[in-house]
Image (cartoon, helix red, strand yellow):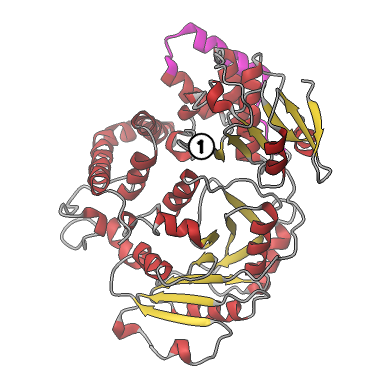
């Protein structure tokens, strides 16, 4: 493909196809994006839904976002797009193994987003062209995509879903399997050099905690040694009255305003929302109580957001080998992954253990959805909700934490009851007025709620097919008969999960 070249006012080379609005392109080149297109109006919106047979509800970008003038989208129109020249050179451009130029562009955008730390953006009005193209993706190209991007199991599942009785599907599968293999270790776009902080940004830091006062105190010490000290730290502590020492937080004077709230409600979502209502900083950093952070942790969060002109980022979450490790261990772990950590890109998950978001967008969401209390998935819901506002959340390799994960304490103390069935079980918030009895819902009803809340019914159905396909196929052939016998019970568990998810959907999003 021969692309034209444009030089921005900053001297950066931009390659493009078609006729972009150069004034708008100039503005975009100064921001977080690396590829820009206006493909929604050109017939590419939600294209190639065959990806659902691999990802469905587990890939945030399976559907394009609605009613936004700018958002992350990997569905590139090859005839109308612009890209930083260095990105084109690092990636090597489109993959000619595909017969269709349209499939080449979709594969390129998908890998840029998912594997290479590159941010592709839909931008309304960058291209005035509104002629809708007809997308034609051949059966062979579809299987080539699956073989080159995923393990063989996913191509077999695709074959099963498309119809194992169809000769054309078998021919395409064997063609792709014979001539191609999965591509691993694709080149990643290195991060930009971080600029010095401009102005005097204020940061509020939120710590929800329960039965972990000793860990929280260690984190407060780390925060007091920051090169950019937060001006406000809000601790919401749910430690039961009989287990707490109310004087601990005030035995030492900190260089920030420490606000303490003893939580009387249940759940980490409610705890964070209580803290959000107190925060006044320009940025909010969310952290778990069981992490350790290096002195430049907060400074690097702000530097990254200012350098990329972004509104949210997720730091690097490093799991400790045991809860007694310290910052020296964190430095050793970072040295060990030195060649793997350096990329930015748009995240495909969100962690409340280490994230930084402009408060104005947190306020727009009004905090966390408390329907998740007692379950799992609140982090992901918050991340997807930010994307739906048009706020890309970038991966930040410069701000790392060591996640200690002690065996006791934390908000999962309440959620542990979810694994119990029968009379000994204590009711969880998501059970509402229908407590679980003898059939434990699987997957977690709050995760199912997230799937139903953010994805299409047919994608949730596809997840169900994949869920049971993997249950049957994973494991020894000798025990297959026993897995088949368990299917009726597994179906009951799945139906129970959907039942509770439906009840939560009827309630709607709740933040208090």
Tell me where the magenta segment starts and ends, as one range.
162-186
Residue at 81% of width from left, 43% of height from top?
9
Q: Say which quadrant the N terminus sits in.
A: top right
For the question of whether residue 2 can be seen, the reply is yes
Q: Image quadrant of residue 375? A: bottom left
Residue 177 visible in the current orientation: no
Extreme top residue here?
167
Residue at image point 62% right, 76% down:
229
| Residue drawn at the location 24% of the way across and 49% of the way down | 507
- Label 1 crowd (10 A; few <14 / some 14-19 / many >=20): many
Can you identify the residue that label 1 sits on? 61
State the residue at coordinates (18%, 50%): 438
Q: Nearer the viewer, residue 60 or 154?
A: 60
Q: Can you give x and y, in whole percent of width and height, for residue 346 in the image?
A: 59, 46
> In the figure, 28 relative to 286: above or below?
above
Nearer-the-camera pick, 323 or 486 = 323
Q: Secondary structure at mark 1?
A: loop
Q: Indicate the quadrant containing the C terminus: top left, top right, bottom left or bottom right.
A: bottom left
Residue 348 quadrant: top right
Q: Nearer the viewer, residue 415 or 285?
A: 285
Q: Is residue 277 left or right of residue 78?
A: left
Residue 387 highlighted magenta (yes or no): no
Seen from this angle, which residue lies furthest front? 23
- Residue 33: x, y in percent? 66, 42
Q: Position of residue 372 (x, y in %)?
A: 33, 55
Query: In the picture provided, is 299 more to the left or to the right than 430?
Result: right
User: In the image, is 246 to the left or to the right of 6?
Assistant: left
> Residue 51: percent from the left, percent from the top?
50, 27
Closest to the observer, 211 or 310: 310
């Amino acid at each position: 493909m021969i692309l034209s070249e444009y030089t921005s006012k900053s001297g950066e080379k931009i390659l493009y196809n078609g006729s972009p609005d150069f004034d708008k392109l100039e503005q975009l080149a100064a921001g977080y994006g690396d590829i820009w297109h206006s493909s929604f109006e050109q017939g590419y919106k939600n294209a190639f839904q065959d990806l659902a047979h691999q990802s469905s509800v587990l890939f945030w970008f399976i559907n394009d976002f609605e009613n936004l003038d700018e958002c992350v989208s990997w569905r590139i129109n090859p005839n109308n797009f612009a890209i930083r020249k260095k990105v084109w050179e690092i990636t090597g451009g489109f993959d000619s193994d595909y017969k269709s130029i349209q499939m080449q562009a979709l594969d390129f955008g998908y890998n840029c987003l998912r594997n290479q730390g590159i941010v592709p953006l839909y931008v309304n009005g960058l291209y005035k062209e509104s002629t809708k193209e007809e997308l034609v993706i051949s059966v062979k190209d579809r299987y080539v995509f699956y073989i080159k991007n995923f393990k063989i199991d996913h191509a077999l599942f695709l074959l099963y879903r498309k119809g194992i009785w169809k000769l054309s599907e078998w021919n395409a599968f064997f063609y792709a399997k014979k001539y191609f293999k999965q591509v691993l270790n694709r080149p990643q776009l290195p991060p930009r050099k971080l600029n010095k902080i401009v102005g005097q940004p204020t940061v509020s830091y939120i710590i929800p905690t329960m039965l972990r006062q000793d860990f929280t105190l260690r984190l407060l010490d780390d925060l007091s040694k920051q090169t950019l000290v937060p001006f406000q730290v809000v601790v919401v502590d749910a430690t039961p009255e009989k287990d707490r020492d109310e004087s601990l937080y005030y035995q030492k004077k900190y260089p920030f305003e420490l606000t303490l709230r003893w939580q009387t409600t249940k759940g980490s979502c409610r705890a964070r929302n209580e803290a959000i209502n107190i925060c006044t900083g320009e940025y909010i950093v969310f952290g778990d109580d069981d992490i350790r952070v290096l002195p430049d942790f907060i400074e690097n969060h702000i530097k990254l957001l200012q350098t990329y002109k972004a509104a949210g980022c997720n730091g690097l979450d490093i799991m400790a080998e045991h809860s007694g490790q310290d910052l020296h261990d964190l430095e050793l772990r970072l040295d060990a992954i030195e060649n793997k950590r350096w990329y930015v890109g748009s995240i495909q998950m969100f962690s409340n253990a280490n994230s930084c978001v402009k408060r104005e967008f947190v306020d727009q969401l009004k905090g966390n959805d408390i329907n998740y209390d007692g379950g799992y998935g609140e982090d992901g819901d918050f991340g997807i909700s930010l994307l739906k506002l048009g706020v890309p959340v970038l991966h930040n390799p410069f701000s790392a934490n060591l996640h200690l994960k002690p065996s006791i304490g934390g908000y999962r103390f309440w959620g542990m009851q979810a694994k119990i069935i029968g009379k000994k079980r204590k009711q969880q918030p998501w059970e509402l007025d229908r407590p679980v009895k003898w059939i434990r819902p699987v997957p977690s009803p709050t995760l199912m709620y997230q799937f139903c809340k953010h994805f299409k019914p047919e994608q949730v159905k596809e997840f169900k097919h994949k869920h049971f396909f993997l249950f049957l196929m994973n494991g020894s052939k000798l025990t297959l008969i026993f897995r088949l016998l368990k299917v009726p019970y597994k179906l009951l568990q799945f139906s129970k999960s959907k039942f509770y998810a439906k009840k939560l959907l009827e309630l709607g999003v709740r933040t208090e």
